[in-house]
Image (spheres, rainbow, N blue to C red):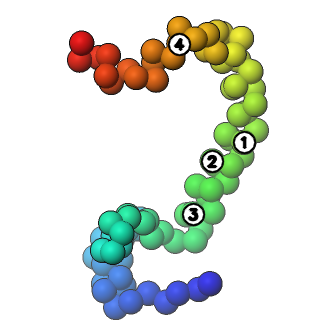
Amino acid sequence: MLVELSQDQRQALDFAGTPLEIVDPRSGSVYVLMRQESFARVRSLVEDELGETYSAQIESAMRAGWDDPAMDEYNDYDRHRSA
């Protein structure tokens, strides 16, 4: 689905450039508006770099003992940090 920019969005892009953060007043969600070419570049970096190495990262973490129940303490790091 292709949606045309509103006049407000066009003016914001002209003033601020991209990427431009846009807030949905109904939900409070923040979206990022950027040129398609920029998005494609970011997307390819994330998909290629992480996608190809994700299984190796998990395997390495498990060999290093990250699946040890004692490591569960790190899931609550912020709660323990102030103690």
Residues under labels 2 and 4: Cα distance?
Answer: 27 Å
**Residue that mark 1 sits on:** 51
Amino acid bearing label 4: Met
Residues under labels 4 and 3: Cα distance?
Answer: 36 Å
Residue 8 picture location, percent across and down: 31, 86
Q: What element carries label 4?
A: helix
Amino acid bearing label 2: Val
**Residue that mark 3 sits on:** 39
Of the numbered discs in the image, which one, if any, rests on residue 71?
A: 4
Q: Do the residues labelled 1 and 4 touch (CB within 8 Å)?
A: no
Amino acid bearing label 3: Phe
Residue 45 picture location, percent across and down: 64, 49
- Quadrant, the C terminus: top left
Residue shown at 38% from the left, 64% from the top: 29
Of the numbered discs in the image, which one, if any, rests on residue 46?
A: 2
Query: Within the image, what quadrant is residue 17 found in?
Result: bottom left
Residue shown at 68% from the left, 41% from the top: 49
Residues under labels 3 and 2: Cα distance?
Answer: 11 Å
Q: Is mark 3 on a helix, strand or loop?
A: helix
Q: Are marks 2 and 4 in contact (CB under 8 Å)?
A: no
Q: Nearer the viewer, residue 34 or 64?
A: 64
Q: Are marks 1 and 2 in contact (CB under 8 Å)?
A: yes
